[in-house]
């Protein structure tokens, strides 16, 4: 049986969640759940899916001069996707659809960074499920593998229902739950009973 972890991205984490361990030092990622959209020998790209911003989709659409006619989306939060290109929008959506610059992730999730998907949402013709972020999380060649080797993250195959349907404040505990772990037992320091 082949070994599961290699120095090359044969342990490909595309379409996986990364859950920050309690000892995560980087404030951008403490308590974060990151959905990995792409993982190759050139690095990795992901979106933090549990950090809602004060910005709503209604406000975002107003800023880019698009109407938003879907009442259920108006108050949905825009998420902080990560510290890279925080002025740029990224849309995780299902179904994958056919947009200008969509990367297919698994069978039913797409990542689009072109405005046409938001224009379709504006017209009521967009994907049925979506999560919009400003910014993304990126790792250079070998950087994510180094962080994994230092136990900064736990990984689990992604669940689209967690991305699109779970309340943001429950996403971390539910992601750990996919591994059968209660995050309360992962304290970085000894606690008191």
Image: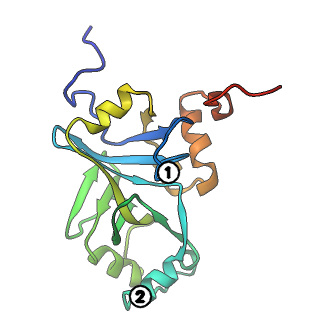
**Residue 177 vertical position relative to residue 135 in the rendered view, above or below:** above
Identify the residue at image location x=42%, y=65%: 133
Q: Which residue is mark 1?
A: 27
Q: Which residue is mark 2?
A: 63
In front here: 58 or 130?
58
Q: Which residue of the protein is positioned furthest toward the top in this rendering?
A: 1
Identify the residue at image location x=59%, y=53%: 166
Identify the residue at image location x=49%, y=51%: 27
Q: Quadrant of the N terminus?
A: top left
- The reply, left or right, for residue 54 in relation to residue 88 is right
Q: Residues within 10 Å of mark 2 (few under 14, many from 20)?
A: few
Residue 171: give x, y in percent of width and height: 57, 48
- The reply, left or right, for residue 170 in relation to residue 109 is right
In front here: 44 or 157?
44
- The reply, left or right, for residue 186 in relation to residue 128 is right
In front here: 163 or 38?
38
**Residue 180 vertical position relative to residue 70 in the rendered view, above or below:** above
**Residue 24 vertical position relative to residue 63 in the rendered view, above or below:** above
């Amino acid at each position: 049986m082949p070994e599961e972890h290699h120095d090359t991205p044969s342990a490909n984490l595309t379409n996986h969640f990364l859950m920050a361990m309690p000892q995560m030092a980087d404030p951008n990622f403490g308590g974060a759940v990151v959905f990995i959209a792409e993982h190759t020998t050139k690095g990795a790209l992901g979106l933090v899916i549990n950090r809602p911003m004060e910005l709503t989709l209604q406000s975002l659409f107003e800023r880019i001069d698009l109407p938003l006619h879907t009442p259920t989306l108006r108050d949905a939060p825009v998420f902080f996707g990560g510290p890279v290109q925080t002025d740029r929008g990224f849309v995780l959506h299902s179904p994958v659809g056919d947009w200008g610059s969509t990367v297919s992730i698994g069978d039913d999730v797409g990542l689009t960074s072109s405005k046409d998907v938001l224009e379709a949402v504006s017209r009521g013709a967009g994907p049925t499920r979506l999560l919009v972020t400003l910014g993304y999380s990126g790792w250079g060649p070998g950087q994510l593998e180094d962080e994994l080797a230092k136990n900064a993250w736990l990984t689990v195959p992604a669940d689209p229902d967690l991305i699109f349907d779970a309340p943001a404040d429950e996403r971390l505990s539910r992601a750990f739950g996919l591994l059968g772990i209660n995050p309360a037992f992962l304290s970085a320091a000894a606690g008191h009973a």
